[in-house]
Amino acid sequence: MAKTIFVLNGPNLNLLGSREPGIYGRETLIQIAARAEARAKALGFKLDFRQSNSEAELIGWVHAAREEADGLIVNAGAYTHTSIALLDALRAVALPVIEVHLSNIFAREDFRHRSYVAPAAQGVISGFGGQSYELAVDAMARLLGGKSKTKIKKNKK
Ligand code: CA2
């Protein structure tokens, strides 16, 4: 059976495509999800793509991932910069976590440079717009041992 990757999206990401195209691009979250799902399918994984404006709901999904998922890709939106509760939840779930952002948070305001999610993550992908999610799927597939694992052929001497 295909391994499942939860992709959790935080507050206001449901507004993508409608405002702030200069920062976040013109794609909607639904379009981003479709591209990421196609990438996951090609690599033999299943995505469960979710968005919530509620910190409590996001934490509930992290808890549920313990039973229902093999890895987590998280764009916590502004909770990235505020939520110790989300950090604690991500640390408690013994699954690989990849933090993802549409924008390059390090090229923006100082308050966005700090991520409370990052200490719980294997890595952070930030600044590639909707493509950040596809890159995160690639990275997660490698962590989980999917089809994208690089095979090095040794030459017989
Ligand atoms: O770059 C990212 O992915 C962010 O996680 C997006 C968050 C922001 O608070 C983080 O610092 C970086 C904001 C998402 C809000 O998205 C909007 C989209 C359209 C209109 C208004 C907000």
Image: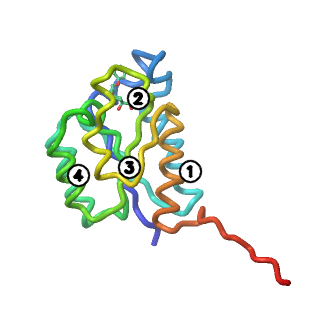
Q: Reading the chain from its start, which is encountered first: label 2 or label 4?
A: 4
Q: Residues within 10 Å of mark 3 (few under 14, many from 20)?
A: many
Label 2 close to label 3 by CB (< 8 Å): no
Q: Residues within 10 Å of mark 1 (few under 14, many from 20)?
A: some
What secondary structure is found at the residue carrying circle 4?
helix
Q: Reading the chain from its start, which is encountered first: label 2 or label 3?
A: 3
- Looking at the rendered structure, which numbered label has been put on residue 86? none
Query: Spatial distance from mark 2 to mark 4, Cα to Cα?
Result: 27 Å
What secondary structure is found at the residue carrying circle 3?
strand
- Looking at the rendered structure, which numbered label has been put on residue 73? 3
Query: Spatial distance from mark 2 to mark 3, Cα to Cα?
Result: 19 Å
Residue under circle 4?
61
Q: Quadrant of ligand 1?
A: top left
Q: Reading the chain from its start, which is encountered first: label 3 or label 1?
A: 1
For image coordinates 25% across by 37% down, the residue present is: 52
Q: Reading the chain from its start, which is encountered first: label 2 or label 1?
A: 1
Considering every residue shown, the one lying at the far bottom of the view is 157
Asked whether 109 or 19 is in front, the reply is: 109
Image position of 103 with respect to 83: above or below: above
Query: Mark 4 or mark 3: which is in front?
Result: 3
Residue under circle 1?
39
Query: Spatial distance from mark 3 to mark 1, Cα to Cα?
Result: 14 Å
- Looking at the rendered structure, which numbered label has been put on residue 106? 2
Query: Spatial distance from mark 4 to mark 3, Cα to Cα?
Result: 12 Å
For image coordinates 46% across by 42% down, the residue present is: 125
Q: Residues within 10 Å of mark 4 (few under 14, many from 20)?
A: some
Image quadrant containing the C terminus: bottom right
What secondary structure is found at the residue carrying circle 2?
helix
Q: Is mark 2 within 8 Å of ligand 1?
A: no
Looking at the image, residue 109 sits to the left or right of residue 143; the answer is: left
Image position of 19 with respect to 38: above or below: above
Q: Quadrant of residue 63?
A: bottom left
